[in-house]
Image (spheres, rainbow, N blue to C red):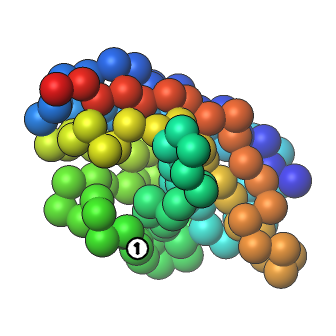
């Protein structure tokens, strides 16, 4: 398993920026990809962005394309969020998928992002 710990959430005004971090530890050497998901109150958890370790390819949800950037430095994953909107308000979760066929098997505890107008 991989242990994940998010940080960097907070309160920000519409149009502002935040950077989320996710520190990974444990069996990181067999990580296939890492990603960010979010869950707003009363809604399902949704995919935000992902990054594969080999090759560094990225994929984004349509709702955040052009505003959010996912990146990695060794075993820390980042989500750079710009031009934030109130609809970006959610708990943001970091997740990891290993080369074990179990999909997104590791999750962080989440960090709250609140965007006010």
Task: Tell me which residue sits at (40%, 73%) in the image.
Answer: 59
Across and down, in percent, residue 33 comes to: 61, 68
- Out of 17 and 31, give the one closest to the viewer: 17
Which of the image's four quarters has the C terminus?
Answer: top left
Across and down, in percent, residue 80 comes to: 31, 43
Task: Tell me which residue sits at (55%, 30%) in the image.
Answer: 111
Q: Secondary structure at mark 1?
A: strand
- Out of 27 and 101, give the one closest to the viewer: 101
Q: Which residue is mark 1?
A: 59
Q: Is residue 71 above or below residue 53?
A: above
- Out of 37 and 88, give the one closest to the viewer: 88
Residue 113 seen in the current view: yes
Across and down, in percent, residue 14 comes to: 16, 31
Residue 22 seen in the current view: no
- Out of 115 and 105, give the one closest to the viewer: 115
Q: Is residue 115 above or below residue 4?
A: above
């Amino acid at each position: 398993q991989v242990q994940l710990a998010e940080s960097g959430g907070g309160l920000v005004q519409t149009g502002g920026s935040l950077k989320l971090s996710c520190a990974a530890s444990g069996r990181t050497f067999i990580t296939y990809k890492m990603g960010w998901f979010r869950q707003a109150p009363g809604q399902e958890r949704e995919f935000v962005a992902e990054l594969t370790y080999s090759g560094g390819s990225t994929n984004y949800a349509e709702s955040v394309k052009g505003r959010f950037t996912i990146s990695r430095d060794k075993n820390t994953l980042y989500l750079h969020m710009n031009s934030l909107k109130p609809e970006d308000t959610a708990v943001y979760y970091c997740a990891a998928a290993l080369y074990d066929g179990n999909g997104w098997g590791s999750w962080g505890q989440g960090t709250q992002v609140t965007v006010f107008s």
